[in-house]
Amino acid sequence: MHVREGNQAIAQLLKGSGKFAKWAAKFTYARGRGRTVGNMLFSIESGLVDRRLRWDAADRLRSMGDDCFGGVDPMAVADGLEVLREDLPTLNEARRHVVASNFR
């Protein structure tokens, strides 16, 4: 979400007909949708680290951050994260397409 290619890939994901695109259209604001999705994606991908420094304040902040994504109803966040995880192959295909098209 911080580089042009990432934003293009997220935009392709959101324009698609996949489950996550439908979820995002229903539960996120159109304005700022890319940033919200980028933050959700960061949450998922940063969770893949194999070592994490932990302390009480950091754990509380992480918990608060995991429940709050730019106006998304907190009750819908868990479902959105799960659907986004399922659609990661679609996002990765969009990433490949964007990168390939930028190097032609």
Image (spheres, helix red, strand yellow):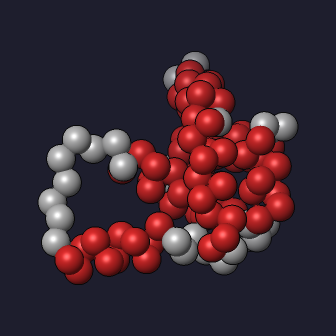
Residue at (25% x, 73% y) in the render:
58
Q: Nearer the viewer, residue 11 or 42?
A: 42
Observer able to see residue 38? no
Q: Quadrant of residue 38?
A: bottom right
Residue at (34% x, 77% y) in the render:
61
Q: Is residue 25 left or right of residue 41?
A: right
Residue at (32% x, 77% y) in the render:
60
Observer able to see residue 26? yes
Q: Position of residue 66 (x, y in %)?
A: 47, 67
Q: Is 22 rendered above or below residue 61?
A: above
Q: Quadrant of residue 36?
A: bottom right
Quarter in which the C terminus is drawn: top right
Q: Is 84 rendered above or below residue 101?
A: below
Q: Nearer the viewer, residue 98 or 24?
A: 24
Q: Position of residue 3 (x, y in %)?
A: 48, 50
Q: Is residue 62 left or right of residue 56?
A: right
How many numbered tags mark residues here?
A: 0
Q: Position of residue 15 (x, y in %)?
A: 80, 43
Q: Is 94 rendered above or below residue 61?
A: above
Residue at (52% x, 71% y) in the render:
67
Q: Position of residue 102 (x, y in %)?
A: 56, 29
